Amino acid sequence: MNILIFGPNGSGKGTQGAIIAKKYNLPHIESGAIFRKNIGEGTELGKKAKEYIDRGDLVPDDITIPMILNRLKEDDCKNGWILDGFPRNKVQAETLAKALKDEGINLDYVIEIVLPREIAKLRITGRRLCVNDPNHPNHIAFDAIKPVEKDGKLVCRVCGGDLKTRPDDQDDAAIDKRHDIYYDDKTGTMAAVNYFKQLEGPKVISVDGRPSIQEVTDSIMKDLK
């Protein structure tokens, strides 16, 4: 079972990806982790990527996509995978789809978590990250996943670990920039989602991201077989 998962920052995409990965025993592959691994191990692709990153430039697709394909061909992906964080735009979607086809790798599902932009922004500014596991959901604005208080401070509701905020989660301009890319349905991430909707082959599962985590999970799971 090979899956792409999409959702704006604040939609719970990482949380849902982790739940799906655990249920189906799939590696939850995040594009950022692939970069860090290649750079850390000093692979040829990693060295090339680092040159761009060190200059503050975007890593081109002809480096990024081979990295991703190499990861998808590793032993732990033999029974499937869930890819999170890529593609981010329509060109990358087209290039990735062609690369998968050329490698004989089927894409079975595309999961889209739909969330209005204003709600996504609220969720970002109120979320807190567990230092032990960033997929432990904590949010100061939602009672169901509100952190708990211990010794006068808020701690993770799941494991009791310390909580932190991402600096860019409290930066309106940074949030707007990320969302500008995601919600762009001409060339951005939404355009990538729409591209996959038109392809023959993968089943597209679009779910409302506004309900609780469990309700969103249930909506995904009923169509994920």
Image (tube, helix red, strand yellow):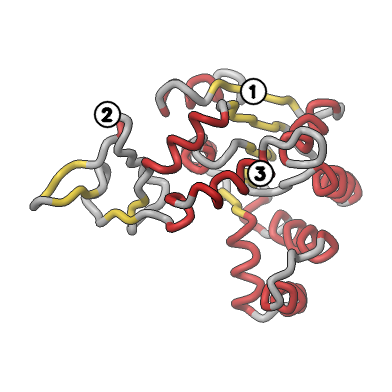
Residue at position x 78%, y 29% in the image? 194
- SS state under label 3: loop
Query: What residue would you read off at disc 3?
Result: 80
Contact (CB < 8 A) between labels 3 and 2? no
Q: Amino acid at mark 2?
A: Asp
Q: Amino acid at mark 3?
A: Gly
The CA span between labels 3 and 2 is 35 Å
Query: What residue would you read off at disc 2?
Result: 143
Residue at position x 77%, y 45% in the image? 89
Instruction: Tell me the quarter of the picture where residue 82 sits.
Output: top right
Residue found at the very far left of the displayed protein: 151
Q: Amino acid at mark 1?
A: Ser
Q: Position of residue 113 (x, y in %)?
A: 59, 29
Residue at position x 61%, y 20% in the image? 223
Q: Position of residue 211 (x, y in %)?
A: 44, 21
Residue at position x 59%, y 26% in the image? 114
Viewer-side residue, 21 vs 87: 87
The CA span between labels 1 and 2 is 25 Å
Query: What residue would you read off at disc 1?
Result: 206
Contact (CB < 8 A) between labels 1 and 3? no
Q: In the image, is 11 to the left or to the right of 147?
A: right
Q: In the image, is 131 to the left or to the right of 104?
A: left
